[in-house]
Image (cartoon, grey):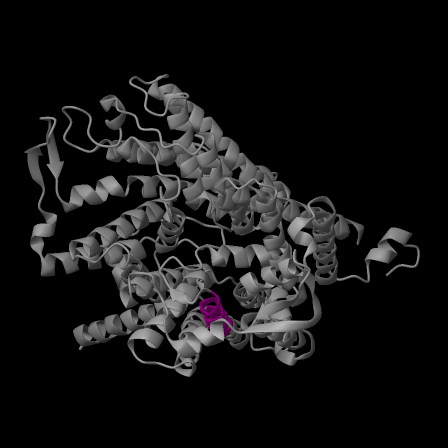
């Protein structure tokens, strides 16, 4: 986002494309697309059919990817800000999603775990869960910003306790909501063929793009991340900026938790959004953002989230069992991070330059 | 130091961060245990309860030692928990399906641990990739590989191994009298001996060898360490290597304790190891930490778990919430102590 626009040809010539941040997720995405094109082009088919309720829906692997990556993309937004400001990651998001989902169900169901009708409007439940998630975000933020505890360690507290708190909110019962209108948000709105989570994710992206464009949040976050001391000398309050990024993270968690709950109309505290924090951190890293804080590119992070989901869906398509999936994912991740390591990228850039030199040399001759 | 400093500063100044945090941990552990003996009584009055805590946490002690070393150099290794599961599964399959002996199982465990340590260390140290991402990939890989090796839980039947698993080492002169008035000596499992040896050896390495001191130097400030002529990359590599090796040993000790292979083994062990290290006074920013502290960190963590379950708060969520609260209190206390100390000096 901070990189000046240059002509594509100019980029290629100087070999600078290898050093551009968004290059990593784009290259990974292209590699995956190419791989799927070669092995099975039907991967990219999109079908238009009627679902069981008689509404027209779009289906196909691409739609699945866009649909399932919604939560991850939303979390990547918050994670990028947290990483940039505090130089650490929030590992409690999975547990926090369990809490926010639990709160939504608690508000909607009241004391009866199997209500015939909802006790409150969905909007109320969502707003309550937003407030609760932001409070938990504020808790993390306070520990990180005002007590100077490393983010990973501070959020370890909520990571340990989160799922237990979620179970405690609902007295360890698993409420189920039978009202179909609740499920619209996790699947399809009647009459609209595109899954609703995609819309929610797009709305979040638009909001964050506007916020970054029209407020100083992005600038201040980067300033604090690069050097909190000099940020302070320039009149920024580093502790407050760090604090606010954790609160924003809480808001993202609430939205992601809302999507997660509406997908199934119920919740399983011990497995909902399990390990999603790792995927969210991975999305930030794949986006080429330094996990030690400082400059960030929001677009790269979000693209990183979609790359991860693309990879997962591709592996599922090849009948990799869900329990063995992490091993393959790890291999791909290692390849990607090795390719994007500064040392390796430098070599790649030099290699590209030498090719360019050879070509211009030939042309001259 | 100026001559006119007040009394408080003079008293605090000679104590390094490491020692200060270590003292807090040890004091808290003893206060907690004695309070449990006084107010809960029952199990806590028996010597065996203490040794049971050791028996159950021998593997965690070893894993936490590795974690502390990596944390002292300013890195982190979140792969150790899943790595333990992978080692258990591989060793179990080796023993029962491939006709291996205890010796081959031990060698296999160490080899897997070392392999992870070498690869992760090389990626972190020589390619400058963030340790969190590298070990995250390591964690994913171990998690997936465990189910690829074998996807179901099974108990090992190998006789030599079962005999080793059931070996109990009785402690002379310690024990308690049971209800019938018979003296029952206290015992520990082999894993505890391994863990104690590991703690002592690592304590000596960290305190008195060149390698140990360079871990602290690299973690405290890599640039100054470099100027002092320490090979920063090599030191980081060795830290991860050591952590991998300890994960190999810890993995086998865990296997020796549970005697089975399962994908769900040692779930969350990496977080417990990190938590123990923190309670023991190791700081994630690097340069501060102590193996003895880590040892007491593990003991404190499991003591609080025991206390919670003995209090009858057996609902699944209480243990986690108390442990989290404990980490929280420790962190806040540490942070306040260090902040005040920095202000004073």
Q: Is residue A140 above or below residue B139?
A: above
- Please identify the dominant SS of the magenta region: helix
Residue A216 visible (yes or no): no
**Image x and y of residue B155, in percent:** 36, 66
User: Horizontally, is A65 left or right of A245 in the view?
Assistant: left
- Residue appearing at x 37%, y 47% in the figure: A276
Please, which residue is most extreme toward the front here?
A: B180
User: Horizontally, is A302 left or right of B314 in the view?
Assistant: left
Quadrant of residue A107 within the rendered picture: top left
Q: Is residue A354 above or below residue A4?
A: below
The C terminus of chain B sits in image quarter: bottom right
The part of the chain drawn in magenta is: B244-257
**Image x and y of residue B73, in percent:** 57, 67
Question: In front: A177, or A91?
Answer: A177
User: Horizontally, is A181 left or right of B279 in the view?
Assistant: left
- Residue appearing at x 35%, y 36% in the figure: A256
Quadrant of residue B260 within the rendered picture: bottom left
**Image x and y of residue A49, in percent:** 6, 34
**Image x and y of residue B157, in percent:** 36, 72
Residue B248 falls within the magenta-colored stretch: yes
Question: In front: B286, or B311?
Answer: B311
Count of numbered labels shown in the rendering: 0
Residue A296 visible (yes or no): yes
The N terminus of chain B sits in image quarter: bottom right
Question: In front: A346, or A323?
Answer: A323
Q: Is residue A52 above or below residue B198?
A: above
Residue B216 falls within the magenta-colored stretch: no
- Residue appearing at x 54%, y 71% in the figure: B191
- Residue appearing at x 61%, y 75% in the figure: B197
């Amino acid at each position: 986002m901070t990189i000046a626009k240059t002509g594509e040809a100019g980029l290629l010539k100087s070999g600078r494309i290898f050093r551009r941040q968004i290059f990593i997720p784009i290259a990974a995405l292209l590699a995956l697309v190419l791989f799927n094109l070669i092995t099975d082009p039907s991967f990219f088919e999109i079908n238009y059919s009627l679902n069981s309720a008689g509404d027209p829906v779009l289906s196909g692997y691409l739609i699945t990817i866009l649909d399932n990556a919604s939560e991850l993309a939303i979390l990547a937004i918050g994670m990028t800000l947290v990483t940039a400001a505090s130089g650490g990651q929030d590992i409690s998001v999975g547990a926090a999603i369990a809490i926010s989902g639990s709160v939504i169900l608690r508000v909607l169901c009241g004391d009866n775990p199997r209500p015939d009708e909802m006790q409150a409007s969905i909007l109320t439940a969502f707003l309550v869960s937003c407030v609760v998630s932001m409070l938990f975000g504020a808790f993390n933020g306070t520990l990180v910003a005002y007590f100077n505890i490393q983010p990973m360690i501070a959020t370890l507290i909520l990571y340990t306790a989160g799922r237990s708190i979620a179970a405690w909110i609902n007295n360890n019962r698993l409420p189920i909501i039978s009202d179909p209108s609740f499920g619209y948000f996790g699947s399809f709105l009647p009459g609209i063929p595109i899954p609703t989570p995609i819309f929610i994710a797009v709305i979040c992206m638009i909001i964050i793009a506007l916020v970054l464009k029209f407020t100083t949040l992005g600038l201040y976050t980067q300033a604090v991340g690069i050097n909190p001391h000099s940020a302070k000398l320039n009149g920024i309050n580093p502790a407050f900026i760090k604090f606010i990024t954790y609160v924003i993270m809480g808001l993202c968690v609430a939205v992601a938790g809302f999507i997660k709950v509406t997908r199934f109309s119920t919740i399983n505290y011990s497995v909902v959004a399990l390990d999603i924090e790792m995927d969210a951190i991975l999305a930030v890293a794949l986006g080429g953002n330094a996990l030690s804080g400082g400059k960030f590119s929001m677009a790269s992070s979000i693209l990183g989230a979609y790359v991860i989901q693309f990879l997962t869906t591709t592996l599922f398509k090849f009948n990799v069992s869900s329990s063995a999936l992490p091993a393959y994912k790890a291999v791909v991740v290692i390849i990607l991070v090795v390719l994007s390591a500064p040392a390796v990228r430098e070599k790649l850039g030099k290699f590209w330059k030498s090719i360019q030199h050879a070509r211009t040399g030939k042309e001259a001759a | 130091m100026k001559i006119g400093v007040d009394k408080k500063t003079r008293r605090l100044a000679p104590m390094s961060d490491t020692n200060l945090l270590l003292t807090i941990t040890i004091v808290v552990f003893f206060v907690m245990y004695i309070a449990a003996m006084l107010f809960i009584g029952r199990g806590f009055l028996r010597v065996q309860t203490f040794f049971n805590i050791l028996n159950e946490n021998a593997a965690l002690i070893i894993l936490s030692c590795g974690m502390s070393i990596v944390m002292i150099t300013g890195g982190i290794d979140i792969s150790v928990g899943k790595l333990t599961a992978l080692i258990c599964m591989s060793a179990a399959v080796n023993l029962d399906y491939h006709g291996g002996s205890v010796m081959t199982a031990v060698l296999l465990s160490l080899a897997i641990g070392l392999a992870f340590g070498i690869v992760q260390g090389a990626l972190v140290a020589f390619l400058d990739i963030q340790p969190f991402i590298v070990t995250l990939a390591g964690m994913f890989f171990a998690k997936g590989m465990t189910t690829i090796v074998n996807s179901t839980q099974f108990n090992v039947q190998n006789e030599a191994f079962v005999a080793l698993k059931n070996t109990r080492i009785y402690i002379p002169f310690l024990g308690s009298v049971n209800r019938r008035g018979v003296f029952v000596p206290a015992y520990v499992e082999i894993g505890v001996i391994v863990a104690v040896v590991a703690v002592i050896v690592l304590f000596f390495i960290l305190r008195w060898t060149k390698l140990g001191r360079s871990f602290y130097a690299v973690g405290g400030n890599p640039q100054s360490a470099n100027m002092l002529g320490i090979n920063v990359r090599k030191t980081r590599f060795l830290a991860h290597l050591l952590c991998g090796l300890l994960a190999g040993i810890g993995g086998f000790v865990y296997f020796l304790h549970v005697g089975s292979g399962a994908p769900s083994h040692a779930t969350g062990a990496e977080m417990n190891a990190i938590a123990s290290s923190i309670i023991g006074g190791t700081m994630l920013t690097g340069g501060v930490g102590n193996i003895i502290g880590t040892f007491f960190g593990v003991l404190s963590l499991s003591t609080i778990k025991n206390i919670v379950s003995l209090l009858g708060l057996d609902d699944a969520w209480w243990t986690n919430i108390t442990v989290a609260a404990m980490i929280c209190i420790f962190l806040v206390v540490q942070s306040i102590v260090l902040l005040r100390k920095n202000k004073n000096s």
